[in-house]
């Protein structure tokens, strides 16, 4: 199965939406650029870079997508803070899964993994903040992680 970068990015956002929802928080996964008029939190998926790894005609040549995944928005109460932390923890747990691969749907609801794909996250303590700059009634949330999605290209795979 060969996907282009745009298709892979949207498939990844859909995969997150399916796999990290929880009773403790209700948030939407959006691919940027997208207008966000949601109150509270959203999970933003933003493409940083896409590039080929290896020779394009090589066996199993790969395309790499470097993506920023952010839990972003505001927590306006202790419930909002609890939901933000639950969303961050759910994202951490899912992205730390062993052997995580990109998943696509066939349009009929059936989900399958993309062969020779993989998803790896990297995080840093400096990538996030929770801050209440002007008030004690609202807390800004910005928790970023960087994800590398590897997909096969149309080489001789």
Image (cartoon, rainbow, N blue to C red):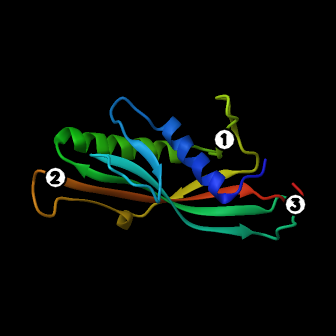
Left or right position of 91 against 25: right
Element at label 3: loop
x and y percentages locating residue 91 in the rendered image: 45, 45
The mark found on residue 104 in the picture is 1
Are the residues flagged by discs 2 and 1 in contact, CB closer than 8 Å?
Answer: no
Sequence-earlier tag: 2 or 1: 1
User: Mark 2 — residue?
Assistant: 138
Element at label 1: strand
- Distance CA(mark 3)–CA(mark 1): 22 Å
User: Mark 3 — residue?
Assistant: 59
Name the front one of labels 3 and 2.
2
Residue 79 versus residue 27: which sits nearer the camera? Answer: 27
Are the residues flagged by discs 3 and 1 in contact, CB closer than 8 Å?
Answer: no
Could you tell me which residue is drawn at 41 percent across and 49 percent down? 43
- Distance CA(mark 2)–CA(mark 1): 37 Å
Residue 6, quarter of picture = bottom right
Left or right position of 82 against 128: left
Element at label 2: loop
- Distance CA(mark 3)–CA(mark 2): 52 Å
Few, some or many C-alpha atoms within 10 Å of disc 1 (few <14, some 14-19, many ≥20)?
A: many
């Amino acid at each position: 199965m060969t996907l282009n970068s745009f298709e892979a990015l949207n498939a990844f956002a859909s995969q997150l939406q399916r796999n990290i929802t929880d009773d403790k928080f209700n948030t939407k996964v959006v691919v940027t650029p997208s207008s966000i008029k949601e109150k509270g939190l959203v999970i933003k998926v933003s493409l940083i870079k896409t590039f080929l790894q290896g020779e394009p005609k090589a066996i199993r040549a790969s395309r790499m997508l470097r993506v920023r995944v952010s839990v972003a928005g505001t927590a306006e109460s202790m419930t909002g803070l609890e939901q933000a932390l639950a969303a961050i923890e759910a994202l951490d747990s899912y992205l730390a899964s062993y052997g995580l691969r990109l998943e696509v749907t066939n349009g009929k609801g059936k989900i399958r993994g993309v062969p020779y794909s993989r998803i790896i996250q990297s995080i840093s303590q400096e990538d996030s903040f929770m801050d209440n700059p002007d008030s004690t009634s609202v807390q800004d949330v910005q928790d970023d992680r960087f994800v590398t999605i590897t997909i096969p290209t149309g080489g001789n795979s």
